[in-house]
Amino acid sequence: MTERIPDEISPESKDCKSDNLIRLSEFRTLWAAYAQSVLGDQLARVALSLLVFERTESAGWTAATYALTTLPALLSGVLLSGLADRFPRRTVMVGCDLVRAALVGLMALPGTPLPLLAGLLVLAQLAEAPFGAAQGALLPTVLGERRYERGQRVMLITHQAGQLVGFAGGGVLVVWLGSHLSLGLNAASFLLSASLIRFGVKARPIASDDVRQKRLHMQVRSGAALIWADPRLRALVALGWLAGFIVLPEGLAAPFADEAGGGGASVGLLLAAHPAGMVLGAALLGRASVGDEWRRKLLGPLAVGANLPLLLYWTGPGVAVAVLLLMASGVCSAYQITAGATFVLLTPAGQRGQVLGLARSGLTAMQGIGVAAGGLAAELSGSSSDTIGGAGLLGTLCAILVAFAWSRARGTGAGTIPLRA
């Protein structure tokens, strides 16, 4: 039995006869807000790292500060993502942007003590998860089921392109502007995002009044139960969490470059290779000749293909070969777009915020565990190449198991979850 994901059609997508997403004014607004926020965030991460290192001259404190830009999402993804179901999603997004603008603005003030800087950073990052949950839950309503995956593809390409620009020019720009002014620009990017969303996105009521009646722990439990009850959702979450293996070379880029005889510039190339591959993979999978059903059938094979290139690290490749391997892994990793879009479309509109938050928190945790475990394994083995190769083997085996689980889930008669708000 072939799965069928029913259509969810927004009023705007009904009125627009063109498939050009940029002609949809709400999507154009959401994309513009997202694009400039991604660039601002990349600038802020570099600025914070340089600012902390200038004050402490400690690599440990610098790394800890960088970690604070991602770790709070674990907590807020579970506890705060449900705000996107309790309140109108436009209101949640605007509120989160205003909170982050105020907090990052305080961080930009010269002379801010480091403990206060760290506290403000944690608070600012707590607002990221409810914003992302609200945005992710709103996109299917704005685009409709037929255009939704294409919209997700555009967002991913924008994110990866922002990372590439950040790796390439973020450091130079921060040195030119200074850390405090760079943080100020990031605060301004949140204000601009809030203005764009407030005046460019339609106000919509909450998806379900029932959600407001639930206590927080019941809302979290309900979201987790929904994922566990549907084998398709379980398999799709597992497909996403495989990124925990694929991200490991990023955490070992610097020691691997040194091991392979590369200089400092090669670290940037290694970090940029996987995002570049994902952009290419997203473009290839987005071709009209590859239909939605085929993309869903390819999820398992592509998940395996994303891990296989890492096995070749056991051969002790040079930097140039490693860059090609990471690009190949990135091309296959573009399956994450289809997996994520399918996951959202199979989730009831009234629970999308909470369920997305749980899935993304798990993904963040798996990536953090993957990098931490990889660093420990590299210390024990004395070889970054062997560690990455081992992660490739373990990731490939897990991907094969998850691919079989997805194949079985797609063929079951599991009830189709309604999508209409």
Image: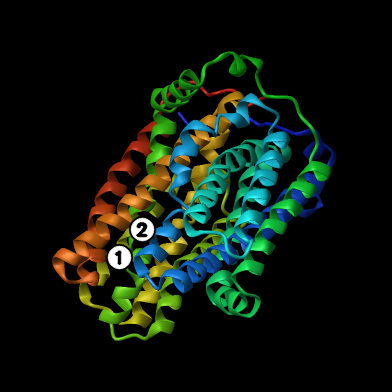
Report the front residue among 19 and 111.
Answer: 111
Q: Secondary structure at mark 1?
A: helix
Residue found 59% across the figure and 13% down from its top: 213
- 321 or 67, which lies in front? 67
Callouts 1 and 2 close, C-beta under 8 Å: yes
Mark 2: few/some/many CA within 10 Å (<14, 14-19, 20+): many
State which quadrant residue 409 falls in. top left
> Residue 11: percent from the left, percent from the top?
80, 33
For this view, does 327 lie left or right of residue 133? Answer: left
What residue did someone put label 1 on?
310
Disc ID at residue 246: 2
Mark 1 or mark 2, earlier in chain: 2
**Residue at the image point whose x is 62% and y is 67% from the top:** 180
Q: What is the quadrant of residue 227 in the picture?
A: top left
Q: Nearer the viewer, residue 112 or 387?
A: 112
How far apart marks 1 and 2 lie (CA) works out to 8 Å
Q: Is residue 215 above or below residue 174?
A: above
Q: Is residue 355 above or below residue 327?
A: above
Residue 223 to residue 273: above or below:
above
Question: Taking 144 as reference, is 264 left or right?
Answer: left
Q: How many marks?
A: 2
Is residue 276 placed above or below 186 in the rendered structure?
below
Local crowd size for mark 1, using a 10 Å CA cut-off: few (<14), some (14–19), many (≥20)? many
Instruction: Report x, y in % for residue 373.
Output: 25, 55
Element at label 2: helix
Tell me the kind of residue under disc 2: Ile
Does residue 20 appear in this view?
A: no
Q: Position of residue 5 (x, y in %)?
A: 57, 32
Which residue: 41% across, 45% down?
Answer: 363
Q: Residue 165 at x, y = what percent? A: 59, 71
Give the residue type that dot 1 points to.
Leu
